[in-house]
Image (spheres, helix red, strand yellow):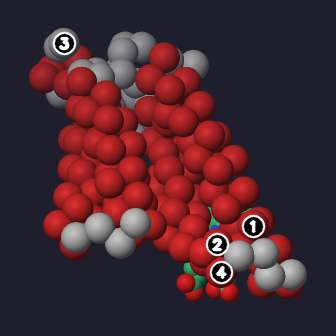
Amino acid sequence: MPRLSVWFIRAALLYLAAGVTFGGLILFHKGMPLHPLLWRLLPLHVEFLLFGWTVQLVMGVAFWIFPRFRRLRGDERPVWLAFGYLNLGVWLAGVGLLLSTPALFIFLGRLAEAGSVAAFALHIWPRLKPPGANLPAKAIKK
Ligand code: HEM
């Protein structure tokens, strides 16, 4: 597995653990009330599990297994950018919602998440190909 996928998948697993813990706490609190502030974890639960876990796992596995060209995956820089932006976005939006920070904070988080998807799409697009197709020369030069 390439190093980048290791990073994506390890980070995804950490978000899964934290997101499920928050979800479990909220669920427990619904049955046996612990503290009303626990509901504030809900946006973090959603952010961690939707973006931190699901999207991050998809990116990590896709980078690893999508078709390669002469055994190369192409330019990895946009994928590193996608990794950074995704995690920045999860924290900005997640913590922003948790602490009810100004909307700008959350907007910047969403912008980072959108930037991450765009950067990832830039990398993966030329790798979407039927078996045997050639890679555009610009995708393999690095
Ligand atoms: C990939 C996994 C998961 C995703 C994407 C996810 C996503 C969500 C979303 C979007 C909501 C908000 C629903 C709403 O506002 O109406 C939510 C609520 C909730 N989730 Fe999850 N969730 C996941 C797994 C879990 C797990 C494993 C648990 C428990 C251990 C859990 C416990 C809860 C609870 C207690 C709520 C609040 C329900 C309520 O409003 O009464 N979730 N989740």
Q: Of the residues tagged 4 and 3, which is closer to the observer?
A: 4
- Residue bearing mark 3: 142
Which tag, 1 or 4, sits closer to the chain's start? 1
Which tag, 3 or 1, sits closer to the chain's start? 1
Image coordinates for residue 142, horizontal then vertical, percent: 19, 12
**Is 142 placed above or below 7 here?**
above
Task: Compute the Cα span from label 3 to label 2.
Answer: 48 Å
Pointers 4 and 2 in contact (C-beta within 8 Å): yes
Query: Mark 2: few, some, or many residues within 10 Å (few <14, many ≥20)?
Result: some
Secondary structure, mark 3, is loop
Q: Which residue is located at x 39 percent, y 43 percent? A: 87
The disc labelled 4 sits on which kind of residue? Pro
Task: Compute the Cα span from label 1 to label 4.
Answer: 11 Å
Image coordinates for residue 1, horizontal then vertical, percent: 57, 19
| Image quadrant where residue 69 sits | top left
Task: Compute the Cα span from label 2 to label 1.
Answer: 7 Å
Q: Which mark is residue 36?
A: 4
- Residue bearing mark 1: 25
Q: Which residue is located at x 23 percent, y 42 percent? A: 119
Along the horizontal axis of the image, is 138 left or right of 69?
A: left
Task: Compute the Cα span from label 4 to label 2.
Answer: 5 Å
